[in-house]
Image (spheres, grey):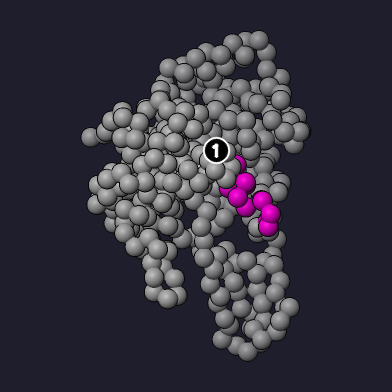
C-alpha cells in the first residue's frame, strides 16, 4: 500500500491519461438519475453522486451480451465474441467495490465464466470513499462496507476541496499513479487531513439496527415461518427491479438468435433475470416452486443473508440500499432487517 495525493485540478488530466489505455467508465448524471457509462468529456464526471440506479458491477456483465457466435447445423463452429477495449471503472463507492468482489467470487470460481473473466482481468478500478451515507436506505455502517480493502487499484479520499489522498493497493495502481506524473507522495499534513476526514466519516455513518453479520444471518434463518414475509410481499408487484439494481444479483438466462440467411451466424446472448419474477422458478412441467410473492421475497433475503454466509462466509448484501431506494412499492430491506432485529426503522 502506498499513499499518494492527487490535486482535484489534475483530475481531468488523469482521466485523459487513463483513456489512452482504457475505456473510462464513470458516474455521470442523466436527467434525475446517475449512471456509469463511458466518459467522453471529463467535465461530465460526477464524483459526489448519491448512488447510481444500476451498480457498476453490471459493467462486467452487460445485459444482452453476445457470449459466442456460431453457424447453425455446424458443430464446433462456436467462436467467442470479439475482444473489447479494457475498462477503467472510475469513482466506484466502497459498497460497490464489495459488490464487485462478491461477483468475482461467483463468476471467477470454477467453472470460470470466460466472458466475465475477460472483462475483469483487463479492468483498472478507481474507488472513492463516501463522506457520509449517500441514500437514506443504505446499510453501509451495518454491513461494514463504508470501508474496503478489496478490488480497487486506487482509492480516492476526498479530504477537502483541493485534493484527494489516494491509496494504491496494487502494483498496477501505484505504477499508473507514478507514470501519470500527476501524483505526489502523501506528507504528514496529508495524513492529518485524512485522519480528520475519517473522523467526520465516523460521525456520519451510524448503524441502523446494530447486528453483526452472523447475528443478522441467524435472525433471518430463524424467520422462515415469520408473517413478515407475507406482510411485506403484499406491496410487491413482482417487477424484479430489486434484482436488476442489486450489485450482487447474478442470475441470467440465455437465448439463441438464429440467422435468416443460411450462411449467416447465430448468436447466443445472455440476459439478466431475477428471482422476484413470477416465472423465475417455473419449470417445463408447469410447476412453480416459488409461486407466492412471499416465497420469492423470503428467498431473496435468504439468498443474501443465509445462503451467501453458508457458501462464502459473508453476506451477499453490501448495504448499498438500491433495492429499497428504487423499489416502486417502497419495500425496504432496512425495514425488514429492523423488524428482525427488534429495532424498527421506518421512513416517511
Vertical placement of 28 versus 68: above or below?
above
- Relative image position of residue 167 (x, y in whole percent): 65, 26
Extreme residue toward the bottom, this view: 262
Q: Which one is in front, 145 or 21?
A: 145
Q: Residue at x 55, y 65 (%)?
A: 270
Vertical placement of 185 versus 291: above or below?
above
Q: Which one is in front, 75 or 328?
A: 75
Vertical placement of 115 versus 49: above or below?
below
Is 307 magenta? The answer is no
Is 196 displayed left or right of 338 in the figure? Answer: right
Residue 227 in view here = yes
Magenta region: which residues? 101-112
Q: Quadrant of the N terminus?
A: top right
Q: Residue at x 30, y 44 (%)?
A: 226
- Relative image position of residue 66 (x, y in whole percent): 60, 67
Q: Secondary structure at mark 1?
A: loop
Q: Quadrant of the C terminus?
A: top left
Assess disc 1: are there few (<14), some (14-19) or many (≥20) residues with their C-alpha within 10 Å of its C-alpha: some
Q: Residue at x 40, y 25 (%)?
A: 210
- Relative image position of residue 147 (x, y in whole percent): 54, 28
Residue where numbered disc 1 is placed: 314
Is 138 displayed left or right of 182 in the figure? Answer: left
Amino acid at each position: 500500500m502506498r499513499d499518494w495525493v492527487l490535486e482535484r485540478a489534475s483530475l481531468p488530466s488523469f482521466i485523459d491519461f487513463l483513456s489512452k489505455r482504457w475505456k473510462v467508465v464513470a458516474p455521470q448524471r442523466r436527467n434525475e438519475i446517475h449512471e456509469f457509462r463511458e466518459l467522453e468529456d471529463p467535465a461530465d464526471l460526477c464524483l459526489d453522486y448519491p448512488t447510481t440506479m444500476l451498480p457498476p458491477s453490471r459493467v462486467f456483465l452487460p445485459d444482452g451480451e453476445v457470449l459466442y457466435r456460431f453457424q447453425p447445423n455446424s458443430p464446433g463452429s462456436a467462436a467467442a465474441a470479439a475482444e473489447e477495449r479494457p475498462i477503467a471503472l472510475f469513482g466506484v463507492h466502497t459498497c460497490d467495490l464489495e459488490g464487485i468482489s462478491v461477483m468475482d467470487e461467483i463468476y471467477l470460481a470454477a467453472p470460470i465464466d470466460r466472458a466475465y473473466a475477460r472483462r475483469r482481468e483487463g479492468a483498472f478500478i478507481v474507488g472513492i470513499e463516501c463522506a457520509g451515507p449517500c441514500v437514506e436506505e443504505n446499510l453501509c455502517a451495518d454491513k461494514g462496507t463504508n470501508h474496503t480493502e478489496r478490488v480497487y487499484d486506487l482509492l480516492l479520499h476526498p479530504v477537502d476541496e483541493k485534493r484527494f489522498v489516494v491509496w494504491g493497493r496494487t502494483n498496477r495502481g501505484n505504477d499508473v499513479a507514478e507514470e501519470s506524473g500527476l501524483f505526489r507522495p502523501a506528507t504528514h499534513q496529508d495524513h492529518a487531513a485524512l485522519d480528520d476526514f475519517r473522523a467526520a466519516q465516523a460521525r456520519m455513518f451510524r448503524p441502523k439496527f446494530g447486528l453483526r453479520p452472523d447475528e443478522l444471518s441467524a435472525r433471518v434463518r430463524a424467520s422462515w415461518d415469520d408473517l413478515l414475509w407475507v406482510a411485506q410481499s403484499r406491496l410487491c408487484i413482482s417487477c424484479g427491479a430489486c434484482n436488476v439494481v442489486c450489485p450482487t444479483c447474478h442470475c441470467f438466462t440465455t437465448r439463441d438468435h438464429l440467422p435468416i440467411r443460411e450462411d449467416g451466424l447465430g448468436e447466443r446472448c445472455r440476459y439478466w433475470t431475477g428471482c422476484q419474477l413470477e416465472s423465475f422458478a417455473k419449470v417445463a412441467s408447469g410447476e412453480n416452486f416459488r409461486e407466492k410473492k412471499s416465497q420469492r421475497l423470503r428467498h431473496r433475503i435468504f439468498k443474501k443473508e443465509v445462503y451467501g454466509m453458508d457458501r462464502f462466509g459473508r453476506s451477499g448484501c453490501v448495504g448499498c440500499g438500491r433495492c429499497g431506494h428504487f423499489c416502486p412499492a417502497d419495500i425496504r430491506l432496512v425495514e425488514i432487517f429492523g423488524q428482525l432485529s427488534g429495532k424498527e426503522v421506518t421512513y416517511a
